[in-house]
């Protein structure tokens, strides 16, 4: 657990949040009930779900629970996939899956495939993931509808606990102008992914004109500090104490910059 809160601060209104890793979840398989498993695990470790919690879940376990996993031995690569794979020493079956999961190719250079996914996100390899997937020949795809997945999990958590929470499904993305990867939101439920600060005033009274904070991405990256990408076995985090803007209609694709506003086309 990463915690900025201590008992000595209880009577002082200091901005603070907690980020709690959810440990001892089982290896997630198809048709597993993620909401129930998360509720049980948080109870077991002494951090039961509370009103206002934000549950951040890695997309891979959502895809595994939904059966959105492909065995590469079942894939017949196209001629294009074969040619690209041969030129850049790639697995042609993986290249084929990447192409199938994309609406179009945004960039293709030096063996890199940057695509627009069927869900509308711009990312490397259409979000196809080999890590944390059981079976050397299996890959996880992005959830078919991450917002719907988040809504389903949120609803079930409410049924099991009576608590109102937000759910974010996250994925690891690279950034075109900075090294390293961060986690971003690809599915949301119960939370507006963008906090619009326009019209507010800053410390010196200036009116903010362009301030729109991608809080769902920020929360996803904050959760990644306790979520393990290697062998830690922590695919879920609970963020507690952040007063997020609530929404029943918001979608994660609101975070995608429209093409007519793309500064790098």
Image: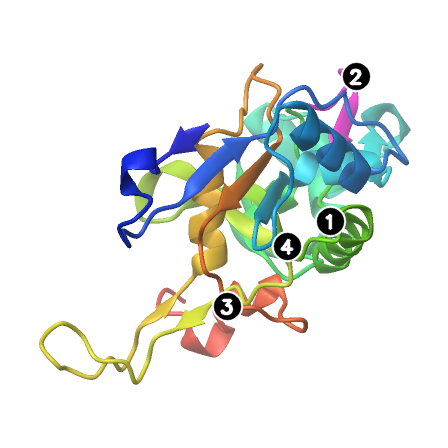
Say which residue label 1 marks.
101
Residue underneath mark 2 = 135
Question: Which residue is pictured at 71% across the width and 23% down the height?
Answer: 25
Residue topped by disc 4: 165
- Label 3 neighbourhood size at 10 Å, few (<14), some (14-19), many (20+)? some
Q: Is residue 7 above or below residue 131?
A: below
User: Taking 152 as reference, is 223 above or below it?
Assistant: above
Q: Nearer the viewer, residue 262 or 245?
A: 245
Q: Which is in the foreground here, disc 1 or disc 3?
A: 3
Badge 4 marks a residue whose secondary structure is loop
Rounded to the nearest angstrom, the CA distance separating label 3 from label 2 is 40 Å
Q: Earlier in the sequence, mark 1 or mark 4?
A: 1
* N-terminal-most mark, 3 or 2: 2
Q: CA distance from mark 1 to mark 3?
A: 32 Å
First in sequence, mark 1 or 2: give its number.
1
Q: Nearer the viewer, mark 3 or mark 2?
A: 3
Prevalent SS, magenta region: loop
**Mark on residue 245?**
3
Q: Tell me where residue 197 sits by quadrant.
A: bottom left
Q: Where is residue 9 drawn, in percent x and y? A: 28, 42
Can the viewer see residue 208 in this picture?
A: yes
């Amino acid at each position: 657990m990463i915690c900025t809160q201590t008992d000595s601060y209880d009577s002082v209104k200091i901005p603070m949040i907690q980020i709690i890793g959810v440990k001892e979840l089982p290896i997630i398989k198809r048709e597993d009930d993620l909401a129930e498993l998360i509720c049980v695990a948080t109870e077991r470790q002494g951090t039961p779900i509370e009103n206002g919690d934000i549950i951040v879940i890695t997309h891979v376990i959502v895809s595994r629970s939904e059966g959105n996993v492909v065995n590469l031995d079942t894939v017949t690569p196209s001629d294009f996939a074969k040619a690209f794979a041969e030129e850049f020493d790639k697995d042609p079956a993986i290249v084929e899956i990447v192409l199938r999961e994309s609406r179009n190719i945004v960039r293709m250079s030096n063996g890199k495939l940057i695509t627009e996914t069927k869900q509308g996100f711009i990312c490397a390899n259409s979000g196809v993931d080999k890590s944390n997937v059981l079976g050397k020949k299996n890959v996880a795809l992005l959830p078919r509808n991450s917002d719907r997945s988040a809504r389903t999990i949120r609803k079930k958590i409410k049924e099991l606990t009576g608590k109102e929470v937000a759910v974010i499904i996250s994925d690891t993305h690279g950034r075109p102008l900075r090294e390293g990867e961060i986690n971003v939101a690809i599915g949301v439920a119960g939370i507006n992914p963008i906090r619009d600060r326009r019209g507010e005033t800053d410390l010196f009274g200036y009116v903010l004109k362009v301030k729109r904070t991608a809080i769902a991405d920020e929360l996803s990256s904050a959760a990644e500090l306790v979520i393990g990408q290697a062998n830690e076995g922590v695919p879920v985090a609970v963020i507690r104490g952040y007063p997020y803007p609530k929404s029943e209609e918001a979608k994660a694709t609101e975070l995608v910059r429209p093409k007519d506003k793309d500064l790098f086309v």
